[in-house]
Amino acid sequence: MSTFLGMPVHAPRGVGHLRGDESFPDAARTALGDSQLRRNLQHATTTIRGKSGRVIAELPDWQELRSAGSALKSYTMAHLPELLEQLEEKVTAAGGVVHWAADANEADRIVTDLVRAAGEQRVIKVKSMATQEIGLNEALEAAGITPVETDLAELIVQLGNDKPSHILVPAIHRNRSEIREIFLRAMPGVDPKLTDDPPVLAGAARRYLRETFLSTKVAVSGANFAIADTGTLAVVESEGNGRMCLTLPETLITVMGIEKLVPTWQDLEVFLQLLPRASTGERMNPYTSMWTGVTPGDGPQNFHLVLLDNGRTAVLADEVGRQALHCIRCSACLNVCPVYERTGGHAYGSVYPGPIGAILSPQLTGVADNASLPYASSLCGACFDACPVKIDIPSILVHLRNQAPHPRTEAAVMAAAAYTMDHPRLYRSAQRAAKLSRIAGRRGRGLPPPLNGWSASRDLPAPPKETFRDWWRNR
Amino acid sequence: MRIALFVTCLADTMFPAAAKATVLLLERLGHEVVFPEEQTCCGQMHINTGYQKDALPLVKRHVKTFEPYDVVVAPSGSCVGSVRHQHAMVAGADAGLAARASAVAARTYELSELLVDVLGVEDVGAYYPHRVTYHPTCHSLRVLRVGDKPVRLLRNVRGLDLVELPAAEQCCGFGGTFSVKNADTSTAMLADKMRHVLDTGADVCTAGDASCLMHIGGGLSRLRTGVRTVHLAEILASTEA
């Protein structure tokens, strides 16, 4: 007898941050009008692009590394069930406890219960996309537990009651004078004479965080990688705050998307070369912390690993779209994207912005819940070239557009256009009609909706007196 | 060589000058150009907007139309990109059609590819006495990887003053229906592209795709900048005589 378990489910509504309040075009319109945001983003993405491009150019085998990363991720996705069970076995054998969370609600509940069981009212957090995705901070606050973000940029976002707008640099939309204002307003015990000099701002955060590190007993982290055959977790970072969270507290709770696995220790060789160069533009990230279960007398003595699905199995079920699970969250695609550079991350409505967000968020939630995101791209292809694990983002965007619900009028127009194009005589009649539109108005000003978006900023060329086809026949 | 022209629906209807120039250029170089009249549209707009089912008959028509020819050329990186990277995918479960589509795709070239790779010409004997800047369109650059082929062709044009476009590899913001569905973001991208074009002091902005030129040219015209857009084929077809 077999039990039909049904199709894998998407990330649930009403929890976490995978869905926006507005469609992308509407949210983008607001962002495009924010000149400070535009300037901050242009400066930041241009700087990271340059830095990353220089260190990537140093490696003669960058393309081979990308192919190796892609192949390793494909292998992992093809063997995910076995590898996850292997990871569970190894983590458990090393003294950790593994929890399986089908969705954001389950993961939030598991973490909240673990903090309560430890008898604590406050947790320190390592920067983590997974916990942002599931809205863990809100869940903890609702349970009377205070989460303190310790990554500098996440702290800026948290103190500013703001939302992250970039995977790697969550406060990329803020410049230093805005950060100074946020610190003065919201950082406990801050020096009122604070300047906007970056070292001074970092010093203020350091003083505030140091106190918190030393007095908090539970930490929550994400993970960049989990190694199935050793049960080792890895976090890579630049600031050292992660290292403090991973080593000082008594209890460590790690929330990790099930796609973060790599099969063996040696596979990290590839990813630890790809990730820093593609993301921060560094040859090597300053801090790489790795831990395997619990080590008596050294580091946290209670370790919990929460394995999060939240729609990932549904993504895995899509033969084309599953490549999105290869993502190592480097954010190279955001930094090269001409759309992201102008709209910023908030317009995408999800914690995963930019090109990767445009293919990941709709797949995690189901395309209907993020129907405008697959269209938030001109399909220029810069993201595909930049991706260190060669995710073919443009092809997945096109694939998701094919699944997206279409406006009824648009669908009718597209069907009529296809029918016309498949009947050369009708096609020639349509060309004649286009020619007649020469008398309809001056250079396409004020076209009817939805074409008015074009005519708002661009002229249409006057249709020529003669089509190519006519010329060919008459020559 | 006998070359079939895949005119593209946009050039046929709105930019016949680019298509005529392609014919006249290839004939000047001693080749025979044929125009299979059953052709209409490759279906790219439908595919990229999420209408693969509607695109299927167009893909079938395209394959059937161009199957008899050994070499096919189009004055468009984007349409050739669709033929090469999307047609077999749209054919999907129809393995026979997918194989035929791949075979046609392998014989289909964008104009600069045909000239440089297939015909082995970099100096087409053109004369064009203007200050020109070249915008590498995204699909010619990143889907077809034409590289510097168009620039090599332009460098050999007599009288032409080629000026480099800053941030040339950034998208102009067209993206087909992207320019309508995300008109504001598209306009913001266009504004930066136009600023870079104007910074060069060029009279003419050229590219290998009529679609991107329609976008850039539409903006330059609206702002009455006096800079015009001209397809690469038209420059290469121009002679002193």
Image: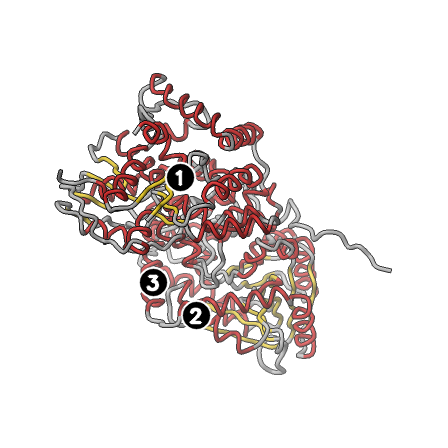
Which of discs 2 and 3 lies nearer the camera? The answer is 2
Compute the Cα span from label 1 to label 2. 35 Å
**Residue placed under numbered mark 2 in the picture:** A64
Q: Is residue A398 left or right of residue B214?
A: right
Q: Secondary structure at mark 1?
A: helix
Q: Chain of mark 1?
A: B
Is A379 situated above or below A458? Answer: below
Contact between marks 2 and 3 (CB within 8 A): the answer is: no
Question: Which residue is farthest right?
Answer: A1
Q: Secondary structure at mark 2?
A: helix
Contact between marks 1 and 2 (CB within 8 A): the answer is: no
The numbered disc on residue A53 is 3
Q: What amino acid is at disc 2?
A: Glu
Q: Residue at x 50, y 72 (%)?
A: A243
Q: Secondary structure at mark 3?
A: helix
Which of discs 1 and 2 lies nearer the camera? The answer is 2
The numbered disc on residue A376 is none
Residue B5 position within the rendered picture, expressed as x and y whole percent measured from the top left: 37, 41
Residue A104 position within the rendered picture, expressed as x and y whole percent measured from the top left: 65, 54
Q: What amino acid is at disc 3?
A: Gly
Compute the Cα span from label 2 to label 3. 16 Å
Q: What amino acid is at disc 1?
A: Thr
Q: In front here: A38 or B168?
A: B168
Whether residue A20 appears in this view of the structure is yes
Residue A332 position within the rendered picture, expressed as x and y whole percent measured from the top left: 42, 58
Quadrant hosting residue B222: top left
Q: Residue at x 49, y 48 (%)?
A: B86
Whether residue A158 appears in this view of the structure is no
Q: Is residue A228 left or right of residue A474?
A: right
**Residue placed under numbered mark 1 in the picture:** B185
Is B89 situated above or below B187? Answer: below
